Each structure stands twice: as structure tokens, then as C-alpha cells.
Amino acid sequence: MNISDREAAYFFHTYKRIPLEIDRGEGVYLWTKDGKQFLDLFGGLAVNALGYAHPGVLSAINEQAKRYIHLSNYFLQEPQIRLGELIIKHSGFKRVFLTNSGTEAIEGALKLARKWGKKHGKNEFVAFSNAFHGRTMGALSLMDREKYKDGYEPFLPNCYVVQHNDVEALRKTVNDKTAAVLLECIQGEGGIRPASADLVKELVQLKKEHGFLLIADEIQSGLGRTGKFFGFEHFDLKPDIVTVAKPIGGGLPLGGFLGNEEVAEVLSPGVHGTTFGGNPVACAAGCVVMQELFDNKLMQHAGMMGEYFKSKLLELKLEFPSLVKEVRGFGLMLGMELTREGETIVSTLRDRGILLNCTDVTVLRFLPPLIIKKEHIDYGVKELRSVLALQG
């Protein structure tokens, strides 16, 4: 059997795999076993911020693995504490809890908000349509897309999803029983759709009136992806809880949620925990990610490259008005919305050695490694221009 047949024989059929067998990666490139080179413009879905085979990440993983790979959270672990210090230093939040993944970070954030809400007589959650927060039951309870929810009912009670950017719907739904509102300031899986200025303004006002917590889902938009540490920094918002994951472990499974002073003392020993969360090898790699973002100014680089990339995509919008509806996003979290389904363009680009993905059916999503340079962007845009010309 070939590798595709083996995968189909032994795994639950949950993934629509890209028909490539990857052999290795370096920088912004991947190579298949037959030697074909690909420019990667979605970086492990925003995980590989430092690209592939980053020497600092490899060294940190190797050095920590030689010391110990796992202890358990009964022990104080220096890589964990060091990463926690860096996160708190650069985020301005008060506490952090490290998880294995983004969906577990969301689940932990909801538990934190529910625990806080019990003392304040609040037990309802509000979120927005078209969002993606993960695949656990808590996350699914605050999403509206049937693709992810069908067959998993019933969901958690007291959870409400309002139309994205619908100020009036938000105003009608939020009340004094609302414990938290969960928001992606820039929806990722939903097609790189930012929160509107009106929604943000109303959210701030309603928070003052009703005293709920604001949870910012920064799993895709956080850690330098948009040219700022968090995506919400592009908006006039101050969340109480923030979830992070994807790039934080340098490619290894790692996530977390952060809390401000309002929730800093809500959790006590034994009320929440994880066996593998905050794995020391992943934390050692995460310290390298933080160093690159801040000490080596990778975040500023991402912002500059994002502006350049967006300008080039906007040129394509002008060239192909019948094909390109809109270009939007921040930093290196960009979306090009098409007037038709985008999967054909994705597969054609793959044949030409360019990897990206299509989300929300019509949106080409660009999430390249933050180390990308102008010459990579120019090459990717040149190939995209050629493919769009064939579609017209």
C-alpha cells in the first residue's frame, strides 16, 4: 500500500489530506520525497512562525530533551517558568496557564470565566457567528457552523451566538447574567474578517454597563502574526482573558490562557489542571519564539512584510476585479476573498510549487512564516497573478 492507502486504512477519516508526502522543511520551503520544492504560504496554519528547521528552536529542543522531556506539573520546571515570565512581561497580563492546544486554552478560559461568574451571579456566554474556537464541547457550544456541530448535540446551556458585527443583536443578547463575551478580533477560519469599529465600541460600552468578562481568542492572530503581539491591539479593546496557541511552541503542541487582575485569584490548587500542558521541551522552544519576536524584532518584520504583501494583493484586486472581491487582514494574516470558490486556485498553485489554503469557501488565506522576505512574496504573487489570469 502507498502512504495514502495506509492512512485511509488505519485512521478515522477526519482529514482531507493534501496529496503530498513531505520529506523535510527549511526556512519558508518544504520538499516532498520526490524532491519537489514548495513555498509555504500557510505555515502549518500559522504554527510555524519561525519557518522550518530554525536553528534556535532545534538547539533548544535538543538541549532540553537531553535534560528531561516530561516530569508533570507537580514539579517546578525552569523552561516553563521562563516562558511564563516572558509571556507575562510582554503581554501585561497577571497570570498564565499553559495547555496542550488552542481548543484546551478556550476550554480553560471558559472554565475560568464560569468560575468567576459564579461569585457574581453570572452564568451566560455570548460569542459571534462564523467564528472558530476549537472542537471541544465548550468551543462548539459557542459556534454556529453546522459543519462542525452537526451530530454532537446537545451543547452547553446558556450559550448564545449573535451575528458577527451586528451591534443591535449583541445589545439585545448581553445582560446582567452574561459572564463573558468571546471574540476573535480577526476571524481566521471564518475568512480573515475583522470586528467592526462599531462592534468594538458597543462591546466596550456594554462591558461597562453589565460587568462581564471579555475573552479574546488570539490563537491564530496572536504572537506577532499581525505585526503586534496580539490582534486585539489593532482595536480599542482590553480583554480580561486571552487564549494563545499555534506558534507559541515553535511547532510543538503548546497553548495557554492569560488573565488580568480581575481573574488572577479565581483558580486555586486542584480546580484545573493538565498532564501534558506546558511540556518543558515545547516551553524551551517557545522561549526561542519569544526571543525572536522581541529581541530580534521579528514582530516588526512581520508587520512590514505584511504591509508589502497586502499591497501586492491589492494590486491583483485592481487587475482582476471580476475575480477578486476584497483583500483584508493585518500583518501576515491576510485574506483574499474571491467571487467564486477558491479550491481550484489553491490546487493549481500547488501544482506550481505554492502552498496556501482556502477557507470559508471563497477566501484564499495567507499565513506564511513570519521570517518571509520580499523575494518570497514577489514569487508567490507572480504565480498567483498567472493563475488568476487563467481563471479570467
Image (cartoon, rainbow, N blue to C red):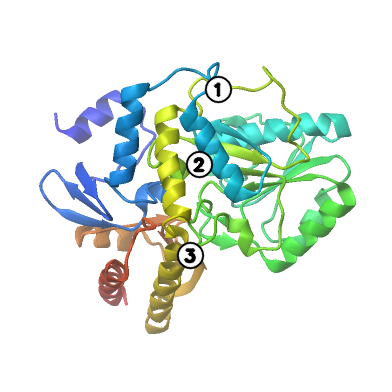
Q: Which mark is residue 245?
A: 2
Q: Is residue 35 left or right of residue 285?
A: left
Which quarter shows the C terminus?
A: bottom left
Q: Helix or strand or loop: what does disc 2 sit on?
A: loop
At x 81% / y 34%, what residue is drawn?
117
Q: Is residue 165 left or right of residue 5?
A: right
Is residue 276 placed above or below 58 in the rendered structure? above
The local crowd at label 3, few if under 14, some if 14 to 19, many if 20 or more residues have their Cα within 10 Å, is many
Amino acid type, label 2: Ala
Q: Is residue 277 left or right of residue 67?
A: right
Quadrant housing residue 120 = top right
Query: In this orientation, which residue lies closer to the viewer: 282 or 306?
Result: 282
Which residue was labeled with disc 3? 331
Amino acid type, label 3: Gly
Amino acid type, label 1: Thr
Q: Is residue 390 left or right of residue 184?
A: left
Q: Give the Cα separation between the discs numbered 3 and 1.
A: 33 Å
Q: Are marks 3 and 1 in contact (CB under 8 Å)?
A: no
At x 39% / y 36%, what residue is drawn?
252
Quick one: label 1 or label 2, which is nearer the N terminus? 2
Query: In this orientation, which residue lies closer to the viewer: 30 or 361?
Result: 30
